[in-house]
Image (spheres, coloured by chain):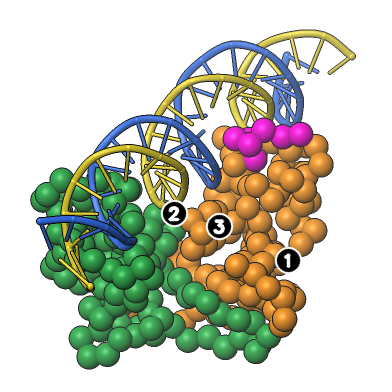
Chain colours: A orange, B green, C blue, D yellow
DNA sequence: TCATTATTGCGATTAAGTCGCAATAATACA
DNA sequence: TGTATTATTGCGACTTAATCGCAATAATGA
């Protein structure tokens, strides 16, 4: 199953490269410009996750968000980091805060999903939200 | 909007009191014995969350899980703690591990949702899973 | 016992994500 | 360059989680 380069893949990647945030399929589709089928975007995103290009976060709104693996930190890739979901601007930010925990060795850890939800530094202060 | 006591509420609560785990609506419905409508279970669970009786966790499977607020720790209520979702037994365990992080004060935190996914101590070792 | 209104059941609906299948197009190779 | 292979795409249908409106029911207080 060798990967092929397609305009779709490049478009999706370029949308995610244009931001430091994690994006949902929906947000990507709105920003991508060209017309790409919803299912195709999901398939591209899933393939990127399989290949380690993106990582997937599931937020407490139940939706999946995708972010470039290296964009999370300017200097190094933090494997497990916190994410911040802002209810106002509806974005998810990769925070440069590593997740620490220790479990009994009988546990096998496969995924770590940490999301803090609230109002981000850009939307906060006196603005109203629901 | 004063709350009323109903058999449904008591049944849902008693299911959650019978375990230390967080349960999905689906799992609760299967275990509850009596016949209660799906939408009603969701409404009861949401009301309990509003009242601070339960807390809600959204796992990386995109589903909501509900757990008693005090059962998470025998001694004290840990407001923000890690959760472990086992892919084998399909349960979510409240871990007695507090979540620590520090954010710039401009952030307003409303919810913390941390889930570690893998194979729990009871299902691990030599068992096969997908 | 009665009136108020919180709660429930039912069915329809929404939204996120996936799947099967036929059509398309990127790659490798002659 | 032309052709065969097969990864990828588009489309529509489907699945599942969760919510919603509305009429019917039942818990509470007087």
Name the residue beneath numbered marker 2: B62
- The residue drawn where x is 49% and y is 63% is A60
- Decide if residue B118 is in sight here: no
Measure how far apart labels 3 and 1 are at the Cα level.
Answer: 14 Å
Callout 1: chain: A
Name the residue beneath numbered marker 1: A20
From the viewer's perspective, is A49 left or right of D21? right
Q: Is residue A65 above or below residue D21?
A: below
- The residue drawn where x is 27% and y is 90% is B76
Q: Are marks 1 and 2 on the same chain?
A: no
Image spot of residue A100 (x, y percent): 46, 82
Q: Quadrant of the N terminus of chain A?
A: top right
Mark 2 lies on a secondary structure that is loop
Residue A56 is tagged as 3
Image spot of residue B32 (x, y percent): 15, 54
Q: Residues within 10 Å of mark 3 (few under 14, many from 20)?
A: many
């Amino acid at each position: 199953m060798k990967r092929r380069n397609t305009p779709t893949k490049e478009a999706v990647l370029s949308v995610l490269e244009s931001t430091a945030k994690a994006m949902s399929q929906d947000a990507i589709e709105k920003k991508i410009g060209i017309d790409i089928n919803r299912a195709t975007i999901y398939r591209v995103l899933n393939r990127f996750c399989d290949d380690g290009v993106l990582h997937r976060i599931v937020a407490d709104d139940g939706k999946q968000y995708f972010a470039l693996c290296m964009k999370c930190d300017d200097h190094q890739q933090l494997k497990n980091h916190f994410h911040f979901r802002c209810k106002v601007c509806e974005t998810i930010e990769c925070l440069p805060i590593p997740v620490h925990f220790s479990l009994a060795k009988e546990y096998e850890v496969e995924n770590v999903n940490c999301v803090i939800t609230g109002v981000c530094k850009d939307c906060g202060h006196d603005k109203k939200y629901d």
